[in-house]
Amino acid sequence: TLSVGSVASPRGAALDEAARRVIPGGANTVTRWIGSPYAFTGADGAYVTDADGRRYLDYHAAFGAVLLGHNHPVVNQAVISAITDRPDLIGLGITELEIEMAELLTSVIPSAEQAVTVMSGSEAVAHSIRMARAVTGRPLLVKFQGTYHGWSDSVARNMISPPERAYGRDPLSAGILDAVLDATVIAEFNDLDSVRALYEAHPEQIAAVILEPIPHNVGALLPTQEFVEGLRTLTREQGSLLIFDEVITGFRHSLGGYQQVCGVLPDLTTYGKAMGNGFPVSGLAGRRELMERFDTAGGDVLMAGTFNGNRVSAAATIATVSYLRDHPDFYERTHRLGQRMRDGLAALLAENGISASVSGFGGTFNVYFVAPPVRGYRDLLRNDARAYVTFHRRMTDKGFLMLPIALKRNHVSGSHTDEDIERTLDAAGAVLKEMAAE
Ligand code: PMP
């Protein structure tokens, strides 16, 4: 469900109109389409500025790609020096920056012995699935209802599905071969039995189980320890790979991602978004014997991309990840502020007698307008998307930018302060009070 703020934005509307003439629907990615009139012209720290000069405290964070804060001087400086002092894209061999980046990634991601970097999370996921099929010689992929793993055909199904299509056949796009869609089978998050049932139905056919360890594309379903450990044991017993898609959780929840938090090591990990603090970069890491199946190492699995490892992405990654490594208090701080936000929202909802559940982990937070407990996607089918839309629109009108899609999460970044959280809670208190009175 998409929603917009309701404050007039003449310059934003003009830009929107100009965009729609030359860009389909006026947006370069579907999730950026929010019905307008938003067009942004500036961003700094925890704030963004729209085309009409209105400032918003930003919890959207470019879908989580911004982790340290917008326009971060350390990352910007690293990129500027990469452009001026490092070799231009040449297209043969390796550069020092790429080695430094891979050394850093393998040193901080617990399951990573080797790493490759690509340009988007979708590419990283597509490579990981092809690798799983090559290594196991099996066709099927297990995905959970509610997770998102990018636009590639194998995973473009069953994200925010309406009740009538949840767990059934719910493609995200036209134009995908039935055979490809049907090679992905759907399980319920936090329900190990639903995965066991798929193994029973398709013996020795499942190449891999892929999951967002916290499905942030539907807010934040928190995995039980039993579930992640159970998946590890089950996939190992069944000869399948376990793929953690840490495109959102990676670097955001801890330096080593959610695998470091839960202590369960996947065979392959995809990561992206926050690792370059807004610059385009993503990657895939895993055990050496798997990664050496890529044809870059003489193996049989295609790994290609003209811009992979380019100097801008590499410099941004090195700057962001080493900043996080050198500032361990970053996690203590964002987790504390995130907890403050979640506790504050839960108290305000209770005070106003609104039946809702606050979810999140670390610096992320979301309000589900559904009574607790929320364990899996099944519980989210009862979510009151209209209540979220009202909440979101009124918060936006007050200058607090959150994701305009019911069920998604919001982000506290390195540049939010205690005062920002307090101001947000004050505004949320006023909005929830209004909603309770209507
Ligand atoms: N995996 C997850 C968990 C994601 O959230 C996303 C993007 N929202 C992707 C993969 C795809 O990444 P990208 O948009 O960079 O292709």
Image (cartoon, rainbow, N blue to C red):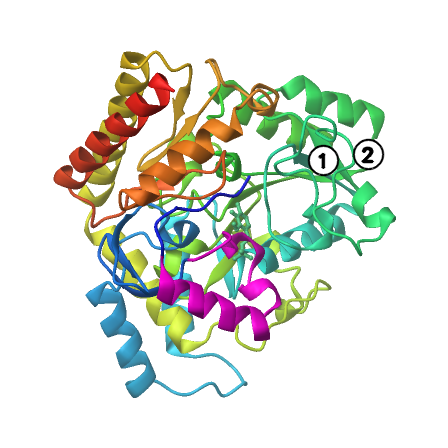
Give the vertical position of 313 relative to 213 (above or below). Answer: below
Q: CA gap, disc 2 to disc 1?
A: 8 Å
Disc number placed over residue 150 in the picture, else none: none
Which type of secondary structure does the marked residue at label 2 adopt?
A: loop
* Quadrant in which the N terminus is drawn: top right
Q: Which residues are magenta?
A: 9-37
Give the class, few, some or many, for how many residues have Cα within 10 Å of label 2's Cα (few <14, many ≥20): some
Which residue is found at the position 65% from the left and 26% from the top? 234
Q: Is residue 127 left or right of residue 355?
A: right
Tag count: 2
Give the vertical position of 51 relative to 1 (above or below). Answer: below
Give the vertical position of 73 relative to 38 (above or below). Answer: below
Q: Is residue 140 left or right of residue 70?
A: right
As drawn, which residue projects farthest toward the right? 179
The residue to which callout 1 is attached is 239
Percent of width and height locating residue 290: 62, 52
Tell me which corner region of the image, top left, top right, bottom left or bottom right, holds residue 428. top left
Q: Nearer the viewer, residue 302 or 381?
A: 381
Point out the tag, 2 or 1, that comes first from the N-terminus.
2
Amino acid residing under circle 1: Gly
Q: Nearer the viewer, residue 102 or 1?
A: 1
Which residue is found at the position 20% from the left and 50% from the top? 415
Tell me which corner region of the image, top left, top right, bottom left or bottom right, holds residue 140. top right
The residue to which callout 2 is attached is 204
Amino acid residing under circle 2: Glu
Give the class, few, some or many, for how many residues have Cα within 10 Å of label 1's Cα (few <14, many ≥20): some
Which type of secondary structure does the marked residue at label 1 adopt?
A: loop
Which residue is found at the position 50% from the left and 58% from the top? 283
